[in-house]
Amino acid sequence: MTPYRRKLFTEIMNHLEQKEFTIILGARQTGKTTLLNQVYQELSIQSKNVYILSLEEPILLHELNKHPESIFQFIKLYGNQKIYVLFDEIQYLHDPSNFLKYIFDKYYERIKIIATGSSAFYIDKKFKDSLAGRKRIFELYTLDFEEYLLFQTQGKELIQEWKQIIEQANYISFKRKEIEIFFNEYLTFGGYPAVVLQSDQQQKIFLLKELYTSFLKRDIYEGNIQNEDKFYFLFTILAQQTGSLLNVNELANTLKLSVTAIENYIYILRKCFHIRLVRPFYRNIRKELTKMPKVYFNDLGMRNILLNQFIPISQRLDKGMLIENYAFIRLRQLYDYEQIRFWRTADGNEVDFVIIKDYKRGFALEIKYDYSEFRVSKYQKFIDEYPEFPLQCRAYVAEKNETGLIAF
């Protein structure tokens, strides 16, 4: 595994002196265990009193399930010094919320817990207590494109060029074509670290198939899914409808399932970090359509393996959806989820993304494969209605005939 540190590492380290416990959640195979080991190494270098414990160890899990005080069979307090206890896979405890609440309420001045957990769905069901004021949750996703460049090139030269491209509209980079190749690979194979570090494209596809199969099996088991085939079909349909409205009634009719079942399947896919829903932006509820959200994937490789689509971007029929989903991933890095919305009216007017900076201002983004497809007149209704949200277009094929990048 690469020694490079994820961006989240710095945030985690900065939070360690806060009294709240540090909880790192994310999909399987995103690098949570590696991140936890890097935190352990850094704390060891700083000569902190630190322990790292895996709840996949049966004896440890058995003892901690008896009572939270059993932790002292595995760690030792040093006077009034704070100790750091790192847990991998906290969700394996029978009652993780009770364990964390007990240790926090009794020992927060002396024990700082940093814990990882896969499948937020599983954790939600076991976290019976909200742990309000006792925890801060950090979400670790697959690599963003900047991290992708670092993992691929083992250096920072291309990252600096990438930053110049996205920060300066007229920046001319001699590395642009090289970055474009990596960008196309990222759009195709996504950001799971094990996939990124594999150089052979057929091996990348094989690994994605393995991840998809193993993930879905675990999701089905943990979610107590009764109809496996329809769960798979729903996941594939969502990949085909990336960036479209999530119409639960329509999906229920298509799959011959109840609305309740569809909502439950969507909940599981969300809580297992496969998909994310974006809510609509509106002020006039009667004129501006719908409470239905739009659906996006948290990793493009996972979306593409569902569709078995790995041909060049320019040849893909779904290239518009793919570029729009990438834009969502990029926006997710820059803004809180509640700031990211979309706009649509009952008569079909739509803007891909509306970013809310505060109640009365922000900006809007329309995402296109080719800038030549963008017509300002098509969005005049939004422009007139929301002048405080200026509309911009970002395209894979840019206005100046440059191709291959969406820079913002």
Image: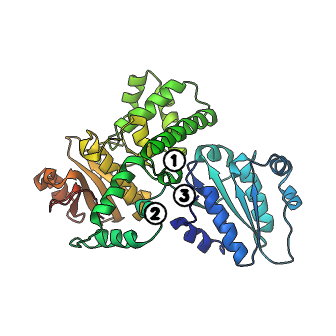
Name the amino acid type tagged 2. Glu
Secondary structure under the numbered disc 1 in the rendered image: loop
Q: Estimate how packed mark 1 is, as few (under 14), some (14 to 19) or many (20 or more) residues with alpha carbons within 10 Å.
A: many
Instruction: Mark 1 and mark 2 in contact? Answer it, CB < 8 Å.
Output: no
Q: Estimate how packed mark 3 is, as few (under 14), some (14 to 19) or many (20 or more) residues with alpha carbons within 10 Å.
A: some
Question: Most extreme residue toward the top, as rendered?
Answer: 256
Residue 335 appears in the rendering: no
Query: The N terminus is located in which quarter?
Result: bottom right
Residue 391: x %, y % from top left = 21, 61
> Circle 3 is placed at which residue position?
139
Q: Which callout, 2 or 3, points at the residue further toward the start of the chain?
A: 3
Between marks 2 and 3 in the image, the one whose residue lies nearer the viewer? 2
Looking at the image, residue 66 sits to the left or right of residue 265; the answer is: right
Instruction: Mark 3 and mark 1 in contact? Answer it, CB < 8 Å.
Output: yes
Secondary structure under the numbered disc 2 in the rendered image: helix
> Circle 1 is placed at which residue position?
273
Q: Which mark is residue 147?
A: 2
